[in-house]
Amino acid sequence: MIKYLLEDEWKVIEDRFHPQYQRSSESIFSIGNGRFGQRANFEETYSGDHLQGSYIAGVYYPDKTRVGWWKNGYPEYFAKVLNSINWIGIRVFVDEIELDLNTCEVLSFWRELDMKSGMLHRSFEVKLSNGKRIAVKASRFCSMSDDETAAISYRVTAKESAQLRVQSYLNGDVANEDTNWDERFWLDRGAQADTRLASVAVETKKTGFLVAASMITRFNGELPQDASSRGFFAEQTYSKHLEAGEELHVEKFVGIVNSLNYTETELLSASQTSAKRISEIGFESAREFHGQFWDKIWANGDIKIEGDIPAQQGIRFNIFHLNQTYTGEDARLNIGPKGFTGEKYGGSTYWDTEAYCLPFYLNTHPSDVGRQLLVYRYNQLGKAIENAEKLGFSGGAALYPMVTMNGEECHNEWEITFEEIHRNGAIAFGIYNYIRHTGDRKYMAEYGFDVMLGICRFWAQRVNWSAEKNAYVMLGVTGPNEYENNVNNNWYTNYLAKWCLTYGLKSIIFLKETYPQLYSEKTEKWSFNEAEETSKWAEIIESIYLPQVEGTNIRLQQDGYLDKDQLLVSDLKDSDRPINQKWSWDRILRSPYIKQADVLQGIYLFEHHFDLETIRDNFEFYEPRTVHESSLSPCVHVILAAKIGELDKAYELYLRTARLDLDDYNHEAYQGLHITAMAGTWMSVVEGFGGLRFRDGLIKLSPVLPKAWKAYSFRISFRERTLLVEVSQDETKVSLETGESLEIELNGQLIRL
Ligand code: BGC
């Protein structure tokens, strides 16, 4: 754990400069608006260690695959979200010495992320090498209410009289740190500048995405004195002599657009129009509109925890970042595991979206937001079929990629790309989850059925009959636990496959009965031989092998798991952890340690298939063997621990998931934040402590209160309604805030709201 940030209910604060954690802080204090995002890099030049990052949703580059040993079926490239035009830049020269926090004496420093209003603030005082002191107050935001715009207010106060020169700039000549071949990804498409407006346009190589940014800068309300442009670069400058105590206020208004939304001819003027729009509104009013947007998000999406500031700060931090990563406005966009906060995972879509993020968006936003996430996969079905064909499947079997931007697989480690096929199940479960939550059964008819068919066809071909076991088996897979590869009969994967086929059969009956015309159209479209194909599905459902420890309730991780030395996490020395940074891969593979919830992931998804004793036995078996080295792990364990009454354990794991990045448990916040796991944090409060479940169209709640909390409350969006759940030591109160009356089950009792 690394603790250097202050605890506060609504803010994240760094109260002095920690250059050694600058990369982590840049991730933690990131801001965004679903359309683009920006790490908390400094506006002024910083020559110390840092990662410059400004990312635009959906704009990526196919970085040619680099592997030691090529395996047939590997994708040609890994799509990467790109570090794009640096729009925050403001260089400051004091008597011609450049302000740079790496080279001057930092007398005071304060960085603050105000999550309530979506603002990043920073103030500091420094002494430059020429002995001159200045104080700076900077604030910025990426507007949520107008997602093509951003603004910066940057105030410089001279402590001694000095000549100030300020250069506000846009720079498209930027690179990613994470490149396979040290390539530059951008082509220069021209820059222009005058004192009113400056712009830079760039284009990605190969993918041909165009991005344009325009800026308007004001200096104490005045126009710049000079402007120039060259290549990727445009600047507006201003000089002024300041007496001691005098201030220069720089306001920078930016418009950023890209070719997902504009044609090439429209692009430049669209970015200029956006910059003008926000500059005409002005910093304070634009910030107010942005703040009102956040007010609405918090009004529905906040979780209040009383009596425990670290827990409160943790959950808000998670909710804040999720909302600024994905807004559900565009079905072409999705949620990268690091959102806009870093380069790791390439900004691509993983199974994380359906397994973790979907429940968060379903419960905290109108249903069309969650629907967009599903439509994204529907639109990529053709590519999922191609992907399966590349691996030797046929007849419309679909294997969704492990990692993708546009539907094509981008990942190239055989044990994950080819073997971590459980992702297909998460996508099917997402359809089920969405319909269960929203009641939108028509979705199945219009979109879901096609996806289900492709997925079921895949599972039907992926299993094989074992004469020895007298059962269908699934060989050579990797479960969610990536610390084991090429295993046979991973319980989670087999169980999920069985469930998918069962749900597939149900969706056929539903479609046939409810939308017969659509059913016959789809049967023809997909050359679906119902009798033949579904009889095989039924056989697999009947006799798929599900490993279990004999004489117990314990579902077995995979064939042969018990042959391993049955060591526990408590047998590990502190110096061994995290094992993925300390041990050889060979040692990890042979160890019994589980990276993340796997059997327990299955028990979480299908909890109602198991009795409490089975849930407890499996939790007690697997929790002591799980090292939680995936951010996606602790939240699932919280939910099950709360279910079986292990509240202290649930609370300990809650802090781990909620404060994973704030306290940097895994020493990796510098790479970016664990955005998708943040949705798991939300689940751990609402499903874990709140005990929220959806069964048979009914909301069920069975809240518990961790000892450290006085009370907590959250809201749920459910079928055009908003419910407020308030849990305190004395009582649980559920109120219907909007929408029609409904019946729910609270602690086993039916009540009408
Ligand atoms: C986890 C995967 C996850 C990926 C992206 C990995 O460390 O093991 O389950 O999909 O991170 O979050």
Image (cartoon, rainbow, N blue to C red):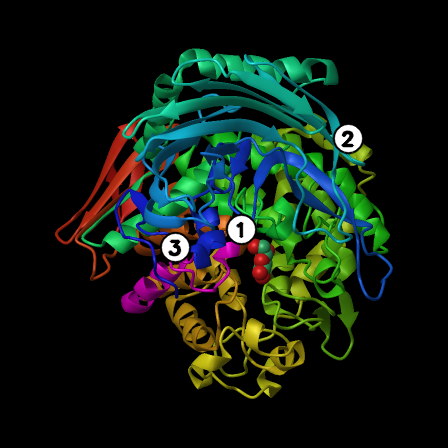
Q: What residue is shown at x 43% (from left), y 33% (from top)? A: 365
Say which quadrant the N terminus sits in. bottom left
Residue at 39% across / 24% down in the picture?
241
Please name the residue that numbered disc 2 is placed on: 208
* Badge 2 or badge 3: first in the primary sequence: 2
- Which residue is labeled 1 in the image? 50
Q: Earlier in the sequence, mark 1 or mark 2?
A: 1
Q: Residue 14's x, y, as percent?
A: 34, 50
- The residue that label 3 is drawn on is 662
Q: Quadrant of residue 289?
A: top left
Q: Is residue 399 magenta?
A: no
Pick the front one: 655 or 407: 655
Q: Is residue 439 left or right of residue 463?
A: left
Residue 417 location (% of width, % of height): 73, 58
Residue pictured at 67% horizontal, 35% vertical:
59
Q: Amino acid at mark 1?
A: His
**Span colored in magenta:** 645-670
Label 2 vs label 3: CA separation? Answer: 37 Å
Q: Secondary structure at mark 2?
A: loop
